Image (cartoon, coloured by chain):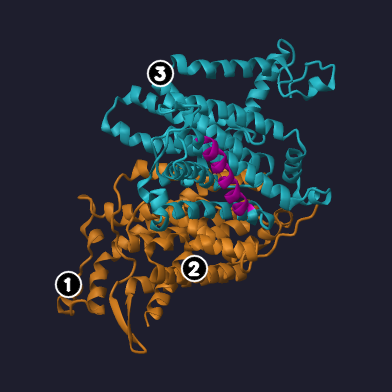
């Protein structure tokens, strides 16, 4: 908490951007995100889009893990559902002869709805089991979803193991057929997602989630329906993951089932832990670290060892080790994540030159 | 009656699941940590077995008896034995004994050291913290272990020697022929023996009683003079040793490959199905899933096998949230 900001009305206190630093930071980020497609090179756009896609998903995961306190290791499954639903809806609408311009308006909400429905289904065990049991139940759901995408029975829709060619969305007659154009869409949705989730926790639903996280039985005694809110939490989080999947489908030319396996679920949770659970900015910091650290490693190793074959062979394992070490290191030494470090930093900045810490 | 053949295959696979499950249950019982990385520890065990049983004995500087121990009488008996008979399999196996023993010892000691390191430097600092952080550390371990594996062992799937002789038996079961591979059958026996021994040891030795006491209530056990950190170390050692044996058996059956790590997840599902803190329940669940997988393979084909344990665990968890024989946790507000 940053102190030293005087508020004179409740309205001021209730604002999302309730102090000057936050305002300055958020507006700068928005300006940067808007300016990016005009001057950045393709590589920067690629990285920014990857961060954006993952950010939407991590914000979704944050709803379930960070705010509701239900451990889920299967959210990559919902991302997969979103990605495949959006592509399939586009294909089906195209088959029916619906004009292109209508497609995204059906496909995006459709994908989110399908993901939310599956989310409710996967969340069902959460009513009876908690903690580790739920983690394994969601993990199992992830395996099953990927399996259903891969089997031959549905391969005429999903493309099976070979993957699915994804559509280019047409917004108001503007076809987003390059990564730079899709980046704009991703940036808009990333901001919207963060804002929506931040707002969610000023409502009855969000406060119910937090009550369940603190102690679910106590929450139930106080009149919070566990059935309703645990499933709502899963639905909201799955819907955001579905949106992330839809963005991924628009962004890549082709999606493959193996993109959405357990490794992605672990990445989502890792980003949340590194960034800080149950915090608005947590997913932002975490996603940036999780996406950019492997890239920095690649660049660093390239500078040190050149582009030899040995360096390329070493790279993947070292990236894996660093990824795991990040999770372990943050759990051991800074369980509240980077948001906590940033809080400390801002607090010191705010009070400077007086008390630190 | 193909049925009997598949049930027997399933039981043999189930025994292996049970052997792997020991590691997860032992660690959970004493430390309340569910080790998501157990499959990857098994993978490391398998690669250590591969190193000590294949790579090192095949080096030029290794003594010749290590790679192939053929005393005079074995060589003679081998010539006399009939092709493909059990005796021939036995005499084929005898020269491999030194490398198998060396490999097993290397795998068990190596995994044991790894487990002790994990327990001491990653788990113990989290004593008393929430369960979530310990689980997340094991999740982080997944990528660290798999990264180290690809760093140290670059080769892909390779084959390693079986622990026991591997003759093929053809039995007659009410008029239908049943094929059993000796090594699979023997590994079922080994797994069952180790499982029985560990359960017996937990029930009747003082170290076992200490583990059970810690699983009941950590702080009370501490105040009664039980060395809780040592109990944790023991539990991790049990997990490492059984995991190393399982890794050796599995890699002899399927070849050494990184996919051994994923195996751990299906065993995790089995453990939850049986009940995290019940050895008996886990044994039953392991056998059930083994047979289920074999029947699924028989009726629906190989691809469905990979999700059979996950579907089974989802159904069981929905009906009995704490597994077949697990104790429900009582929560007080």
Residue that badge 3 annotates: A41
* Tag 1 and tag 3, C-beta contact below 8 Å: no
**Numbered disc in front, either 2 or 1:** 2
Figure colour of chain B: orange
Residue A186: % across, % down: 52, 29
Residues behind callouts 1 and 3 on a single chain: no
Magenta-tinted stretch: A104-123
Residue that badge 2 annotates: B289
Q: Nearer the viewer, residue A312 or A38?
A: A38
* Tag 2 and tag 1, C-beta contact below 8 Å: no
Q: CA distance from mark 2 to mark 1?
A: 43 Å
- The residue at 33%/70% (across/down) is B164
- The residue at 44%/28% (across/down) is A176
| A103 left or right, relative to A125 | left
Quadrant of the image for the N terminus of chain B?
Answer: bottom left
- The residue at 43%/72% (across/down) is B295
Tell me the subunit letter for badge 3: A
Residue A77: % across, % down: 51, 47
**Residue B94 visible here:** yes
């Amino acid at each position: 908490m940053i102190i030293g900001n005087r508020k004179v009305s409740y309205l001021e206190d209730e604002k999302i951007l309730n102090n000057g630093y936050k305002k300055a930071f958020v507006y700068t980020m928005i300006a940067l995100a808007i300016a990016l497609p005009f001057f950045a090179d393709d590589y920067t756009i690629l990285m920014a889009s990857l961060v954006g896609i993952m950010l939407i998903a991590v914000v979704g995961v944050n709803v379930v893990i960070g705010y509701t306190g239900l451990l889920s290791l299967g959210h990559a499954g919902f991302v997969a559902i979103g990605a495949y639903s959006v592509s399939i809806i586009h294909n089906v609408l195209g088959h029916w002869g619906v004009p292109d311009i209508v497609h995204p308006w059906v496909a995006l909400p459709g994908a989110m709805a399908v993901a939310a429905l599956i989310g409710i289904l996967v969340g069902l065990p959460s009513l009876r089991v908690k903690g580790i049991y739920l983690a394994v139940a969601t993990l199992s759901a992830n395996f099953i979803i990927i399996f259903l995408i891969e089997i031959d029975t549905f391969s005429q829709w999903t493309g099976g193991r070979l993957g699915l060619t994804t559509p280019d969305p047409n917004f108001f007659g503007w076809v987003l057929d390059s990564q730079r154009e899709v980046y704009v869409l991703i940036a808009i949705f990333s901001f919207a997602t963060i804002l929506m989730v931040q707002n969610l926790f000023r409502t009855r639903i969000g406060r119910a989630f937090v009550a369940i996280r603190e102690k679910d039985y106590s929450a139930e005694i106080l009149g919070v329906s566990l059935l309703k809110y645990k499933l709502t939490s899963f639905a909201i989080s799955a819907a955001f993951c579905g949106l992330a999947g839809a963005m991924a489908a628009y962004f890549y030319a082709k999606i493959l089932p193996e993109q959405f396996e357990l490794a992605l679920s672990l990445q989502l949770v890792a980003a949340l832990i590194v960034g800080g659970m149950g915090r608005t900015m947590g997913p932002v910091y975490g996603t940036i670290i999780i996406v950019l650290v492997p890239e920095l490693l690649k660049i660093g190793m390239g500078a040190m060892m050149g582009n030899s074959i040995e360096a390329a062979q070493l790279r993947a394992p070292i990236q894996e080790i660093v990824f795991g070490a990040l999770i372990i290191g943050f759990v051991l030494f800074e369980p509240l994540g980077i948001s906590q470090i940033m809080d400390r930093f801002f607090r010191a900045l705010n009070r400077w030159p007086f008390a630190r810490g | 009656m193909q049925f009997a053949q598949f049930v027997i295959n399933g039981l043999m696979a189930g025994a292996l699941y049970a052997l792997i499950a020991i590691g997860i249950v032992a660690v959970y019982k004493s430390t309340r940590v569910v080790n998501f990385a157990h499959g990857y520890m098994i993978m490391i065990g398998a690669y250590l077995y591969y190193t000590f049983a294949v790579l090192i004995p095949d080096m030029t500087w290794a003594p010749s008896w290590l790679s192939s121990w053929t005393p005079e009488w074995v060589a003679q008996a081998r010539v006399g034995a009939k092709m493909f008979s059990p005796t021939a399999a036995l005499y084929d196996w005898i020269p491999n004994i030194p490398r198998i023993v060396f490999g097993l010892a290397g795998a068990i000691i190596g995994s044991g050291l790894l487990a002790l390191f994990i327990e001491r430097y990653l788990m113990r600092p989290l004593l008393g913290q929430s369960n979530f952080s310990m689980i997340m550390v094991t999740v982080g371990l997944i990528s660290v272990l798999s990264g180290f594996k690809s760093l140290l062992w670059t080769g892909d799937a390779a084959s390693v020697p079986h622990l026991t002789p591997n003759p093929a038996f053809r039995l007659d079961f009410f008029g239908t022929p049943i094929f059993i591979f000796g090594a699979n059958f023997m590994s079922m026996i080994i797994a069952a023996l180790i499982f029985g021994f560990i359960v017996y040891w937990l029930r009747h030795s003082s170290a076992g009683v200490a583990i059970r006491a810690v699983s009941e209530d950590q702080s009370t056990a501490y105040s009664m003079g039980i060395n809780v950190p040592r109990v944790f170390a023991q539990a991790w050692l049990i997990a490492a040793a059984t995991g190393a044996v399982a890794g050796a058996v599995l890699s002899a059956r399927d070849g050494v490959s990184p996919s051994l790590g994923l195996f751990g997840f299906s065993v995790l599902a089995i453990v939850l199905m049986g009940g995290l803190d019940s050895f008996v329940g886990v044994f039953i669940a392991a056998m059930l899933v083994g047979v289920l997988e074999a029947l699924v393979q028989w009726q629906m084909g190989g691809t469905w096998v990979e999700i059979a344990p996950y579907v089974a665990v989802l159904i069981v968890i929905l009906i009995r949230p704490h597994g077949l024989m697990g104790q429900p946790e009582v929560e007080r507000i």
